[in-house]
Image: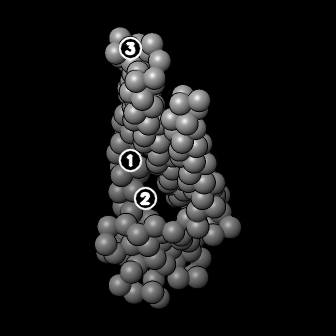
Amino acid sequence: MKKVIFVAPIILLIFTLSLFAKEIEKNNKNCDHHFTCLENLEIDIDDDILILTCQNDDDLWIEITPDGDLSISDHPVYLDRHQQKLMAEYYDQFMDIIEQAKLIGKEGAKIGVKGAKIGILAAGAVIKMLVTDYDSEDLEEEMEEEAEELEARAEDLEEMAEELEEQAEDFEELHYTVKSEIKELDELDWF
């Protein structure tokens, strides 16, 4: 009977943490897609349109469609084929970066919850040592297995972050290309 008394709260706590992790994941799916960046830029995504707004002047904003159409403050900008292709690429790379960042955030949250579960398992195992023939070697072996899995997931997360950094560097180059090749964007000091 003692075993059940000690184990039941631990199982309840683990169950509660797993529900919390699922709630975090659910909330991330309902993200409103609004970001603030570089102290002077707000980013929104509305009906698949990327909207960049100057925080210092609400009358200035850029809209970019998935097809590479561009407008500045509701005024369409004429683009030749090359420029429109650049804007479509800009849109795609921007969206890819957002998606990758969201994936990294979700995976980071999952790893954090897994780490908390390991802590709870360790606490439960110590109690288990007191009431069963489970010993410190069993505990050490179990914790090493859990830690190895967690470390592998953390390494995967680090690789994802490095890929995101490379994407951001490529995007930065594209940003400067777009700015230099489209006069209307080059005239905006905040873009």
* Separation (CA) of disc 2 from disc 3: 64 Å
Name which of mark 1 and mark 2 comes first in the sequence.
1
Q: Residue at x 47, y 88 (%)?
A: 59
In this view, the mark in front (2 or 3): 3
* Separation (CA) of disc 1 from disc 2: 15 Å
**Protein image colouring:** one colour
Helix, strand or loop for disc 2: helix
Kindly identify the amino acid type of the residue bearing the numbered disc 3: Asp
Residues tagged 1 and 2 counted as in contact (Cβ below 8 A): no
Give left or right: position of 122 versus 7.
left
Q: Position of residue 90 (x, y in %)?
A: 50, 54
Q: Nearer the viewer, residue 166 or 185?
A: 166
Q: Residue at x 68, y 67 (%)?
A: 47
Helix, strand or loop for disc 1: helix
Can you identify the residue that label 3 sits on? 135
* Separation (CA) of disc 1 from disc 3: 49 Å
Q: Position of residue 11 (x, y in %)?
A: 57, 37
Q: How many C-alpha atoms fall within 10 Å of the one at disc 1: few (<14), some, or many (≥20)?
A: some
Give left or right: position of 180 versus 63.
left
User: Disc number at residue 168?
Assistant: 1
Q: Residue at x 45, y 23 (%)?
A: 131
Q: Is residue 104 above or below residue 150?
A: below
The quarter of the rendered structure image containing the C terminus is bottom left
Helix, strand or loop for disc 3: loop
Residues tagged 1 and 3 counted as in contact (Cβ below 8 A): no
Quarter of the figure with residue 124: top left
Q: Is residue 179 above or below residue 39?
A: above
Name which of mark 1 and mark 3 comes first in the sequence.
3
User: Disc number at residue 178?
Assistant: 2
